[in-house]
Image (cartoon, grey):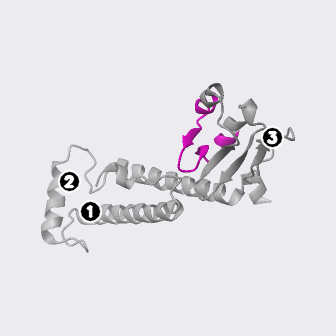
């Protein structure tokens, strides 16, 4: 399996579910690593550990004895720390994607088109009545928007950065002169949640 097969993209409709499954796997692995380390600390060997055959346990004992590390245990501290960091990263990513989905970003009309937050595709889409000029297309590209022929729209990933980028583009400013960033709903802060 290649690395590309394991990447969970934010625009995947099942990204949150996949991330939750990956989080559960990491949490289970963390518990298993802790159990094996505790068993080895108590017994000085992995022989007799449940879920390991005697051959597997002896192979693990040899690997521990021959390891370069001064930490003589099945899983060195860095392995536990790295896995714990991955758990925290996954939790934050799940929270961010859930927030983006629940926020309900709003679109706007501009002179010659409209901006539409497409939550199904996780994209902020710019729909123009006519093809933008070459200069306008260059500005769109500089701000991370790309032409998607399948959608017939200029688009980029739907997140707060998309709205900050859109706010910098003069020709897609709202007709009513409102600020693109200020019309977007804000995620509740930690202070709001605790109240």
**Going 40% across and 66% down the picture, which residue do you hit?**
28
Nearer the observer, disc 1 or disc 3?
3
Q: Are marks 1 and 2 in contact (CB under 8 Å)?
A: yes
Question: Which quarter of the rendered picture does the N terminus lie within?
Answer: bottom left
User: Marks 1 and 2, Cα distance to the nearest angstrom?
Assistant: 10 Å
User: Marks 2 and 3, Cα distance to the nearest angstrom?
Assistant: 64 Å
Q: Position of residue 151 (x, y in %)?
A: 57, 50
User: Is any atom of residue 101 visible in this view?
Assistant: yes
Circle 3 Cα neighbour tier, 10 Å, few/some/many (<14 / 14–19 / ≥20) = some
Over which residues does the magenta segment extend? Answer: 139-163
Towards the viewer: 145 or 15: 145
Q: What residue occupies the far right of the structure in this picture?
A: 176
Q: Position of residue 138 (x, y in %)?
A: 60, 27
The disc, 2 or 3, on the residue closer to the chain's N-terminal end is: 2
Q: Is residue 172 above or below residue 53?
A: above
Circle 1 Cα neighbour tier, 10 Å, few/some/many (<14 / 14–19 / ≥20) = some
Per the image, label 1 sits on a secondary structure element best described as helix
What label sits on residue 64 in the rendered view?
A: 2
| Residue 147 lies in the magenta-colored region | yes
Q: In screen coordinates, is 100 left or right of 3?
A: right
User: Is any atom of residue 159 visible in this view?
Assistant: no
Q: Is residue 98 above or below residue 49?
A: above
Q: Position of residue 142 (x, y in %)?
A: 59, 29
User: Marks 1 and 3, Cα distance to the nearest angstrom?
Assistant: 65 Å
Towards the viewer: 33 or 17: 17
Q: Quadrant of residue 129?
A: top right
Q: Position of residue 57 (x, y in %)?
A: 18, 65
What label sits on residue 174 in the rendered view?
A: 3
What label sits on residue 40 in the rendered view?
A: 1
């Amino acid at each position: 399996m290649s690395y590309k097969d394991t990447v969970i993209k934010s625009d995947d409709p099942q990204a949150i579910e996949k991330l939750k499954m990956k989080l559960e796997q990491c949490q289970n692995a963390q518990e298993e690593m802790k159990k094996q380390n505790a068993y080895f600390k108590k017994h000085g060997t992995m022989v007799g550990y449940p879920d390991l055959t005697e051959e597997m346990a002896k192979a693990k004992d040899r690997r521990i004895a021959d390891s370069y590390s001064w930490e003589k245990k099945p899983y060195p501290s860095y392995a536990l720390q790295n896995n714990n960091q991955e758990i925290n990263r996954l939790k934050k990513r799940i929270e961010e994607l859930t927030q983006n989905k629940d926020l309900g970003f709003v679109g706007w009309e501009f002179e010659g088109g409209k901006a539409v937050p497409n939550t199904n595709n996780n994209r902020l889409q710019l729909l123009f009545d006519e093809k933008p000029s070459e200069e306008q297309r260059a500005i769109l590209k500089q701000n991370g928007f790309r032409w998607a022929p399948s959608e017939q729209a200029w688009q980029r990933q739907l997140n707060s950065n998309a709205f900050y980028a859109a706010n910098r583009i003069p020709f897609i400013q709202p007709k009513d002169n409102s600020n693109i960033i200020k019309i977007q709903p804000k995620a509740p802060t930690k202070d709001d949640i605790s109240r």
